[in-house]
Amino acid sequence: MIRIVLARHGRPAWDFRTPIAGHALAEWLRGEAEAPLAGSPRPSAELERLSRTAQCLVASPLRRSRDSAQLLAPAAVPLVDPCFREAELPSAFRSSLRLRPEMWSWLARSAWFCGWSAGVESFSAARARAASAAALLTRHAAAGGAVVLVGHGLMNILIARRLRASGWRGPRFPSPQHWTFGVYERAAA
């Protein structure tokens, strides 16, 4: 049996509550990308165990993913690959209306699903990248038996969809909460 674990990174230490203008979303997203991890909540003991015993630990190049991988398995050197980064949010809003960043993010992601990419990777391109990421994880699992990806909410969901389509068993959608994970298994070929 080979296994792929799709884990979501820890919560960034960033202000998600203070309302921002729509035209400030791009700057806010850059700040979130540079933010260190918050001190709590902490990952579960089970996720730490899976990460420390995996033959391959994989991370996105985004700081929250790399820092989370380091926290989960301090002795491991993760494979960092841009194919695992989160699907970017379009942020070309011109509005001065002030909303919480999560509301601007929700609006941007909803528009992105409907075809508005405004200078970032399109939904169809992100799905194609997820297919490549799933294939890469499958190759690593076939070579070593167990892989843990410390990735991102939406990209993990897109990867899970591709894994399940190619015969892996596991949750339909890995949880989008920080420090949660889904386990996908398949008989070794």
Image (cartoon, rainbow, N blue to C red):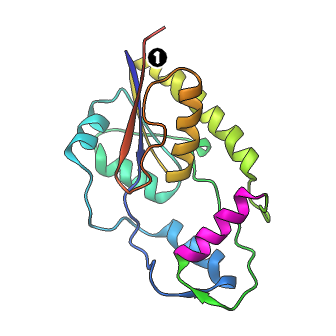
Q: Is residue 79 left or right of residue 38?
A: right
Task: Answer yes or no: is residue 75 visible.
Answer: yes
Q: Quadrant of residue 29?
A: bottom right
- Specify the quadrant that holds the N terminus: top left
The foreground one among 66 and 154 is 154
Extreme residue in the top direction: 189
Residue 81 lies, with reference to residue 10, above or below; the image says above
Residue 107 part of the magenta-drawn span: yes
Q: Is residue 143 left or right of residue 109?
A: left
Residue 95 part of the magenta-drawn span: no
Where in the figure is residue 50, as x and y percent of width and height? 28, 35
Q: Which residue is mark 1?
A: 143
* Residue at (51% x, 44% y) in the render: 156
Query: Hey, what amino acid is under mark 1?
Result: Ala
| The magenta segment | 102-114
Residue 67 lies, with reference to residue 75, above or below; the image says below
Element marked by disc 1: helix
Where in the figure is residue 96, as x and y percent of width and height? 69, 91
Where in the figure is residue 160, as x and y percent of width and height? 52, 36
* Residue at (54% x, 21% y) in the render: 139
Where in the figure is residue 48, as x and y percent of width and height? 25, 43
